[in-house]
Amino acid sequence: MKISEFAKRVNISVETIRYYHREKLLDVPASDVGVRQYTQSHIDQILFIKNAKLAGFSLKEIQRLNMFDAVTDRQSILALSEKKKKRLQLKIKELKGAMVFLDSLVSECKTSKEKPCPILEGLKGNCANN
């Protein structure tokens, strides 16, 4: 199957597939008369990458996960996953703070129709400590 057909089947771009090949996230398939032969194994690798990204792992972390063995590297996998959970919790906290800040700016803009919208001033830092 051609790379374009494989890309359609796994619902990612051809360039993303090529990138995954370069980054050693996806095995380069054998070639038969100039056409790469993608297999179920390649589909499984793409599914793994997609699910790992969905779980919040970066491509670099996915490379590490790909090197682990599910039986012998259980503790390493668990440690990496626990570390990722902590970083995600921190990111969620940061995003909640951003939402509170932006919510206050939007609310202020909606209620102060007689003067310029305060969002830009707020983003410049004039009210970030309020």
Image (cartoon, helix red, strand yellow):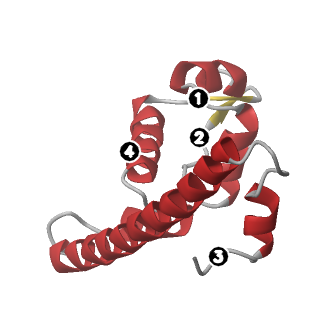
Locate the C terminus by quadrant.
bottom right
Q: Which residue is mark 3?
A: 128
Q: CA distance from mark 3 to mark 4?
A: 37 Å
| Tag 3: amino acid | Ala
Task: Say few, some or many: other residues with alpha carbon within 10 Å of mark 1 (under 14 / 14 to 19 / 20 or more).
Answer: some
Q: Is residue 33 left or right of residue 62?
A: right
Q: Is residue 6 left or right of residue 53?
A: right
| Mark nearer the viewer, 3 or 1 | 3
Residue 33 in the image: x percent, y percent? 74, 26
Dot 3 or dot 2: first in sequence order is: 2
Q: Which residue is mark 1?
A: 37
Dot 4 or dot 2: first in sequence order is: 2
Q: Secondary structure at mark 4?
A: helix
Q: Secondary structure at mark 3?
A: loop
Please say if 126 is above or below 121: below
Residue 76 in the image: x percent, y percent? 25, 79
The residue nearer to you, when weighing 97 against 105, is 105
Task: Say few, some or many: other residues with alpha carbon within 10 Å of mark 2 (under 14 / 14 to 19 / 20 or more).
Answer: some
| Tag 2: amino acid | Pro
Q: Are the residues at dot 1 and dot 2 in contact (C-beta closer than 8 Å)?
A: yes
| Mark nearer the viewer, 3 or 2 | 3
Q: Which residue is mark 4?
A: 51
Q: CA distance from mark 3 to mark 2?
A: 53 Å
